Amino acid sequence: MVKINVIEKIIARHADKKSVEVGDELSVNVDLAIAHDVTGPLAIEQFKKIGVGKVFDSEKVVFVSDHNIPCSSVNSRVQHKSLEDFSKDFNVKYYGRSEGVIHQLIMEENLYKKGDIIVGADSHTCTAGAFGAVAIGVGSTELAAVMALGKIDIEVPPVKVIKIEGNLNDNVYGKDIILHIIGKFGTNGFTDTGVVLTGESIINLSQDDKMTISNMMIEMGAMIGYIDQGGEIGEVEENYIIKAEDIVPCVACPPSPGNVKPITEVEGTAINQAVLGSCTNGRYSDMATAAEVIKGKKIAEGVNFIVVPSSKRVAEKMDETGITKIFRDAGAIVTNPGCGPCFGAHQGLLNYDDVAVSSTNRNFPGRMGHKEAKIYLASPRIVAESAVLGKLSSPGKVI
Amino acid sequence: MDEIKGKGFYLGDDIDTDQILPGYAMSYPPEDLKKVALKGSEITDFAEKVEDGDIIFAKDNFGCGSSREQAPLALKSTGIGAVVAKSFARIFRKNAINIGLPVITSKDLDKIIKESEENDKFKLNIKEGLIINIRTKKEYLAEKLADTTYETLEAGGLINKVRKILINRGEINE
């Protein structure tokens, strides 16, 4: 019997230990430290206060400008400049030309590796759990400490396993799976916990769907989100079983990602904005799913459909296969790669009486503009169907 | 740091970082963060009303959402003494401690909010884990901080702690 579980094994190896216990306070080695244009500059400021002349390993620190790109204000230009200057002075990698959302780009650069410990100054760093990494989201000061020491102090978390049993229903995507889970366990269901998702149907999902799922583990408060890589999980604190047949196409209704309902319950709700993109659902497969719905159709009157490819590579492939043209012909606004309007700073903010359906990850009050605006989170399929019909719509209404 | 005194502000569950500090304000220079603190919450005029030492009382999952450290920084820059909540989201809790803002959990939160009125003043002793409503003289329990957390707060935040490590190693000067 394996006593140590898969997350503990990775943590133990990075602390040069054979075994660890839940609650142990450890200083562990970090394989990669990442930040973007709204968390990186503050990390740099804090790093400079430490007074150390170099980062722990210049190959293992990466900055990406993705939140405000191109710069949405003079202040955001100051932030980009800080990353540019630091990357030159300290010889670290910086992506500042709209190469993509940090988690998508780092994946494409093959820097999310199985068994690694990754620390990112972004809550969605847990996306890397799709690749079997232990990935921890932190704030800027904690990242500054990692940049200096190459280590992070963590406690060994209790690990809980969610197993999806049986075969998934038609028109159920990675987004529906994770929304179903968040709806069941709530926005603080796994605070300070390591969550492992397993089951045949999960292991067999596409890499893109796995990324969507691990990406939103933070919406349940998880410290670590991890997708079973098909190996031994080991002994864990608690097991939950969810029947795949119970998972249906669903949406997270305002005002929280935990307020999840089957799409059939809110079908017909009028919308005037649809957003396709983000580190959650802005990959090529998401674009292809939506394009299939939209091909030859028009976006409903009065609806802004904003499409934000999650990386330059995604955008290039969309151009090559004609998907960009399908969207533009239908009346969509296709932007440059980046975070887009997801975090409420630019590229499509909402007024108080606006209602949006979005493939992004959060719908708290004010997330995308006015705090009274309503945001429904959904799969790219539902976003596309709703954009064509001008109201929340189940998969299958358009095609 | 141990004894904090000020009036209470009361909030509910799931006060996420967008409500504490809106996304567009993440690019603001540090001195401008104060004026948007809690702008997205029910207390839209928090920045005008807050005084040094005031305490925010909130329910479950305070600080959930994004990892933006500008959220606890904005609160700290208003001069508040502490945030007391039923529970905190992990990254927010860590960020607050790392910048030297006390965040304390209390199981008595529902009682505190129910038995208090607007502008009531409180005394909070972090070391003893005790909260007192000065008007009603009622006492409530707060959970004591873990030793390592307390050390970080006492050092004035994580950066000072890291400096100590590097000074001991002889890698930086005092």
Image (tube, helix red, strand yellow):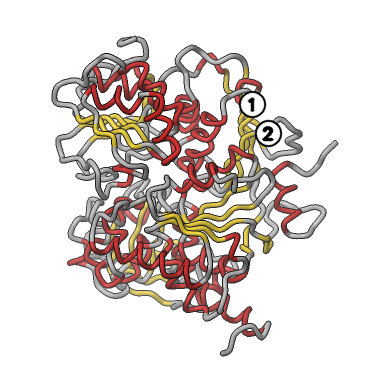
* Three-letter amino acid code of the residue under disc 2: Gln
Q: Residue at x 22, y 60 (%)?
A: B118
Tell me the element at label 2.
loop
Circle 2 residues within 10 Å: few <14, some 14–19, many ≥20:
many
The residue to which callout 1 is attached is A203
Task: Name the chain letter of the residue that bears numbered label 2.
Answer: A
Q: Give left or right: position of B26 versus B47.
A: right
Residue A165, labelled with which disc? none
Give the x, y percent position of residue A220: 48, 40
**For residue A284, which quarter of the picture?**
top left
Give the x, y percent position of residue A238: 66, 36
Circle 1 residues within 10 Å: few <14, some 14–19, many ≥20:
some
Q: Tell me which numbered mark, 2 or 1, is placed earlier along the sequence.
A: 1
Task: Name the chain letter of the residue that bears numbered label 1.
Answer: A
Give the x, y percent position of residue A37: 38, 58
* In the depicted structure, whether residue A278 falls above or below residue A320: below
What residue occupies the far right of the structure in this picture? A1
> Exactly how many numbered labels are in the figure?
2
Question: Nearest the camera: B110 or B51?
Answer: B51
Determine contact: label 2, label 1, CB under 8 Å. Answer: yes
Q: Give left or right: position of A192 versus A384.
A: right
* Three-letter amino acid code of the residue under disc 1: Ile
Give the x, y percent position of residue B88: 45, 53
Question: Nearest the camera: A212 or B99?
Answer: A212
**For residue B146, which quarter of the picture?**
bottom right
Residue A95 at least partly seen: yes
**For residue B124, which quarter of the picture?**
bottom left
Q: Residue at x 46, y 52 (%)?
A: A122
The residue to which callout 2 is attached is A229
* In the depicted structure, whether residue B168 falls above or below residue A17: below
* In the depicted structure, whether residue B61 falls above or below residue A160: below
Q: Residue at x 14, y 22 (%)?
A: A301
